[in-house]
Amino acid sequence: MALTLRAVGGLTTAEVARAFLMPEATMAPRISRAKQRIKAVGASFEMPSAQEWPDRLDAVLQVLYLIFNEGYTASSGPDLHRGELTTEAIRLTRMVHRSLPDDGEVAGLLSLMLLTDARRAARTGPDGALVPLAEQDRNLWDAAMIEEGTALVTASMSASPLGPYQLQAAIAALHVQAPRAADTDWEQIRILYAILTRIAPNPMVTLNHAVAVAMTRGPQAGLELLESLDGDPRLARHHRLHAVRAHLQELAGEYAAARENYRLAALRTTSLPEQRYLRARAGKLER
């Protein structure tokens, strides 16, 4: 998957490393070893056997998911969004869906991409500044993409075994169906994240789960859940842990601690829009 992201997806080694929550120094030799292994065994492009198919499909879906993620929120550089990556990820996922129309996870991934990308126009202001979900102008969201994505996830969840892409799409659907941020069904989102944590645990799921817990059980409950990530080496220097902790501390009225975590998050991201947003949040709390 790492080699495919580098050689086919066009991501830099640093971007691939960030997608897998590991240092670039660890990822670079991994990609080199993959190249050498392919060369050594004389690998060729062949249709996988029936036994190989599930693992191969899982890898394809994860590659498309990670390309989309890098496009939707660029991990470095001056722009929040890289439209060429999200557009290509959606195009390729549509191809997979046409080939496998009854696969629930393929439909779930396409739904997730559509429901997420539908918010693109509202995610930045006229000056390119990041606009968080709760403050976005929902009239700018793409209604056609929301309708298509919602129909896909509704049909797939009723007809297929439940999987992580379907769950994430269902969460995205709940966000875009709320006419106002205050109308968001956070309790349903919390339940879906709890299920997702059981079937596909990873630190980013836990981060999002903590926000949902904070919105339903109070910010202190969300902060307690974040403590489980403090010893996770994958997040040791990742800005999102500090950013989420700062947000929950702000909700809890712990303004001095929130300010410091916003500043730490700003130092640890290489995305300029995220840096500006996080510094602005810290500055607001300073005042």
Image: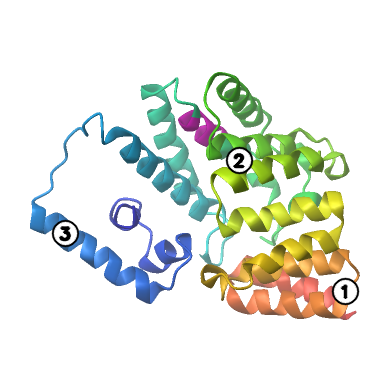
Kindly identify which residue carries mark 3: 37
Toward which corner of the image does residue 229 lie, by quadrant? bottom right
Kindly identify which residue carries mark 2: 168
Q: Is residue 52 left or right of residue 156?
A: left
Q: CB of mark 3 within 8 Å of CB of mark 2?
A: no
Q: Amino acid at mark 3?
A: Arg
- In percent of width and height, residue 244 lies at 72, 64
Toward which corner of the image does residue 130 lie, by quadrant? bottom right
Toward which corner of the image does residue 250 lie, by quadrant? bottom right
Q: Magenta residues?
A: 105-111
Kindly identify which residue carries mark 1: 254
Q: CA distance from mark 3 to mark 2?
A: 34 Å
Q: Is residue 94 left or right of residue 28?
A: right
Residue at the image point whose x is 61% and y is 31% from the top: 145
Q: Amino acid at mark 1?
A: Glu
- In percent of width and height, residue 86 lies at 49, 45
Name the quadrant of the C terminus.
Answer: bottom right
SS of the residue at dot 2?
Answer: helix
Q: CB of mark 3 within 8 Å of CB of mark 1?
A: no
**Upstream in the sequence, badge 3 or badge 2?**
3
- In percent of width and height, residue 71 lies at 50, 52
Q: Is residue 184 left or right of residue 209?
A: right
